[in-house]
Image: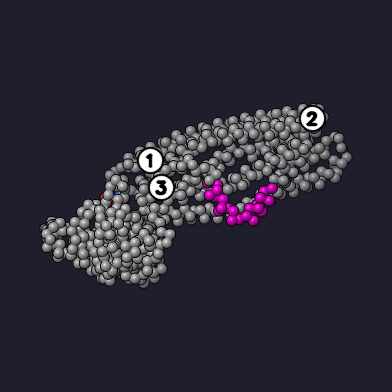
Amino acid sequence: MRRDTALPAPPPAHRHDWQTVKTLLPYLLQWRGRILLALACLIGAKLANVAVPLIFKDIVDGFAPANPVQAVLVVPLALIAAYGVLRFGVSLFTELRELLFTRITQRAVRTIALQVFEHLHALSLRFHLERQTGGLTRDIERGTRAIGTLISYTIFSVLPTLVEVVLVLGILAARYEPSFVLIASGTLIVYITYTIVLSNWRVHLRREVNELDSAANTRAVDSLLNFETVKYFNNEGWEKARYDQQMLKWEAAQVKSQVSLSWLNLGQAAIIAVGVTLMMWRAAVGVANGTMTVGDIVLVNAFLIQLYIPLNFLGVLYREIRQSLIDIERMFVLLNQNLEIQDAPDARTLAPGPCAVSFGNVSFAYEARRPILHDVSFEIPAGHTLAVVGQSGSGKSTLARLLFRFYDVNAGTIRINGQDIRQLTQASLRAAIGIVPQDTVLFNDTLAYNIQYGRPTASLDEVREAARAAHLDAFIERLPDGYETRVGERGLKLSGGEKQRVAIARTLLKNPPILIFDEATSALDSQTEKSIQAELDQVARGRTTLIIAHRLSTVMNADEILVLDQGRIVERGTHRALLEQAGAYAKMWLLQQQEDSSPAAKTV
Ligand SMILES: Nc1ncnc2c1ncn2[C@@H]1O[C@H](COP(=O)(O)OP(=O)(O)OP(=O)(O)O)[C@@H](O)[C@H]1O
Ligand SMILES: [Mg+2]
């Protein structure tokens, strides 16, 4: 059964917003000085902003008939100049604040993105086999973007609005009768409560939209990754229908989310309209009674509009902040994914030099319900070659994965030079092992890059030497772009045999004391296989080598051959000894000899 979400589980309910903020805070608090300075700018901008209507009121009152002479001459000019300076001051402080904060925000985004990336590489193969690439990349993309949104919205919008609300309420309280402050704060409280209640209700709708969005992206990416398979089976229509199925759900969720947003906006507008009307009514009454001037009406109106604009955004802000918290939380869930394979606290590094490998009574299951290996024991003395043969699915490649410690064994131990590999650092263990895997996947880059990947510090000459040893040189020389030829997504522009030889070349370049060849030559024609085999034998000399193969002719020189059947070793010995036993190995050998000499095989 396929799972459609990218992650094993949606964000668990116990991870609250506050926790998300707490995880985020340390990334920001490294910049205390800068933050304080930015906050000072913020308060400066707000003071200037509130002062503008105050001056404007004085200008208006200056023209009022009560004080005619002064009005025309001195006061207005000074006031008008102050008015201009203050207006500019608002912008100046705002920009300064923005500049001061950019580095903090972007550095936090970068640090966290890097941490997630590093963590993803540290997660187990099991996680990566279960993940869905499309959904995963969406989660990271949304999460990092949300950090920027969250910071700029809280610090650049919510905080300034709060400062402004406090200032305005203070001025209203100081200057006018209490009803103004009562109406203004009453409206605010109703407004904020309404916004929060409704937005909380909308959060699950947003979450649904997000999950459907990731799921749709997962489907699209998976489908495109399988481009060839889709064509082989003429299944474009089917793929389209599957994608659309997902997009249909997404569309419905989006519409639902939009409807709820409209309700939110309408309600907010109604609350503000009531508040503003009440205030203007009080102001009109005041002017009629002679307790307020025309300038006061202008001032109250200006304050209301000034408050109204950011308040109008409060809904959006609240929503965006919640949204960002959800997105960030989803990304942090990735960071909280436990590492299945970890270095032991007292892990040692594997000393360089020859390595002896031993499996002692190893049992293993990928999933508890289905055991794969049963009580497997063998030794490969340093510099020796062990071959494993057996039917498909008998667990051969699993041996290689366990030695590489992609998984830990369920019982028994794997040792290198007598040390349990769980007591070694993963880095030193893996540095000692070179694998030519059964299926080679390449980076979408040049041939040179892919070969050099075996040892990024290798010189171009060494790359050429490795390519020569893997019998790639003749092929590469025939290419118009030579080593600079791009290999396409996952290396699909190369033939199976070419890919396999790139894998061999980069393993040779890595030059490790332990080699694993998992069907390393299975994709090659007999002639190329023979010549590469000679090369590999040469390379394997003096190294500890594990060869996994179907074609028995490639393993007959091994020091010991194991025959694996459904996860159990059923026969073991040298080629000669196994033939003499006349058991499963001898039977396989006979069968392959017949195939090789039959006329049908010759024409192939
Ligand atoms: N990640 C996994 N999760 C669950 N089961 C797995 C996983 N990988 C492999 N298996 C199962 O483990 C068994 C052994 O797999 P393995 O790859 O070791 O076989 P093999 O002997 O190398 O076969 P082949 O010759 O076809 O390469 C198979 O039956 C396979 O279905
Ligand atoms: Mg295999």
Amino acid type, residue under disc 3 in the picture: Gly
Which residue carries the number 3 mark?
134
Q: In front here: 434 or 414?
A: 414
SS for dot 2: helix
Q: CA distance from mark 1 to mark 3?
A: 13 Å
Q: CA distance from mark 1 to mark 2?
A: 65 Å
Q: In front here: 339 or 200?
A: 339
Q: Does mark 3's beta carbon lie closer than 8 Å to ligand 1? A: no
Q: Are marks 1 and 2 in contact (CB under 8 Å)?
A: no
Which residue is drawn at the image coordinates 58% and 37% (left, top)?
Answer: 315
Q: CA distance from mark 3 to mark 2?
A: 64 Å
Which residue carries the number 2 mark?
287
Screen quadrant of the C terminus: bottom left
**Whole-percent x and y of residue 318?**
57, 40
Q: Are marks 1 and 3 in contact (CB under 8 Å)?
A: no
Relative side of 344 to 436, left or right: right
Q: Is 25 a magenta residue?
A: yes
Q: In front here: 167 or 220?
A: 167
The disc, 1 or 2, on the residue closer to the chain's N-terminal end is: 1
